Amino acid sequence: MAASTALAAAMPPHFSPSRGASEAGVPKKSTISLVAPSARHRRRPARVIRVFRSICRTLPIFTPKCKIPSVACSAFASPLAGTDSGRRHRDLVTGTLFGCRKGRVSFSIQEDPRCLPSLFVEFSLQTHVLLREMSTGMLRIALECGKNGGKAASSSSRTLLEEPMWALFCNGKRSGYGVRREATVEDLGVMETLRAVSMGAGVMPAKAEGEEDIAYVRAAFDHVIASKDTEILYMLSPEDGSGPDLTIFFIRL
């Protein structure tokens, strides 16, 4: 997968953030009962904690003389475990992919279905294309952005999910862009309608003639922060394994 080098340029003229589900018949004046996410989903770790982590990483690692057999614990090893797993931060979040059948896909991350989105990204990927790729049983979405070259100093304090735009790849194919934006009233109306849904896929019927249905996929995601430039969302499938294998990567190169 090639790194995106053109993200510093202006967004292509044919792609501009849409109003999300504005054509979906969600009442603009609907009552929104979603609550704000907790502080841990809204701000970065305190500076003292970040400095402490940096100091810990500079300490030498001593190898003990007595070796513990690794075979005994290999059966319990997590697929996410690695040599640097102690540095990874993991969290469980709710992710939702949705969009009008003839429109573009939007992706939201919530602390849980009752909270306001902590991240909202609009893809230039069409909804029917996403559903077609997902029907294969495996879906890999990669969102890549650059470090802005000379602007690195000004963006050094920006977290990966605070980047404004990413190059979008769907199953290895370049599929346009992903743009971070604020959720509209219509988007929040969709989240409110799905408030009681923790996992599932389906179609929200249009509420008026001439409006479009909204297809959605919602699931719990294991959010892994591997480093300041890599974050991964693994979709947790049902126990019977009937769900698709979906992973979303956020990468800064």
Image (spheres, grey):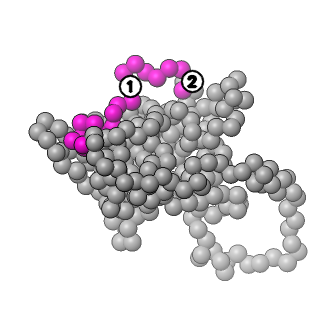
Judge left or right: residue 52 versus residue 6. right
Looking at marks 1 and 2 on the same chain, the residue that comes earlier in the sequence is marked by 2
State whether the magenta stretch is mostly helix, strand or loop. loop
* Residue 240, percent from left and from top: 35, 71
Say what secondary structure mark 1 lies in: loop
Residue 236, quarter of the rendered image: bottom left
Task: Check disc 1 and give the amino acid type.
Answer: Phe
Disc marking residue 15: 1
Task: Check disc 2 and give the amino acid type.
Answer: Ala
Disc marking residue 8: 2
Q: Residues within 10 Å of mark 2 (few under 14, many from 20)?
A: some
Asked whether residue 131 is in view, the answer is no
Q: Which residues are magenta?
A: 7-27
* Residue 53, percent from left and from top: 77, 54
Judge left or right: residue 26 versus residue 146. left
* Residue 121, percent from left and from top: 44, 40
The residue shown at (59%, 75%) is 76
Q: Residue furthest left?
A: 209
Q: CA distance from mark 1 to mark 2?
A: 15 Å
Q: 172 above or below 90?
A: above
Judge left or right: residue 31 versus residue 158. left
Residue 217 drawn in magenta: no
* Residue 15, percent from left and from top: 38, 25
Judge left or right: residue 243 versus residue 230. left
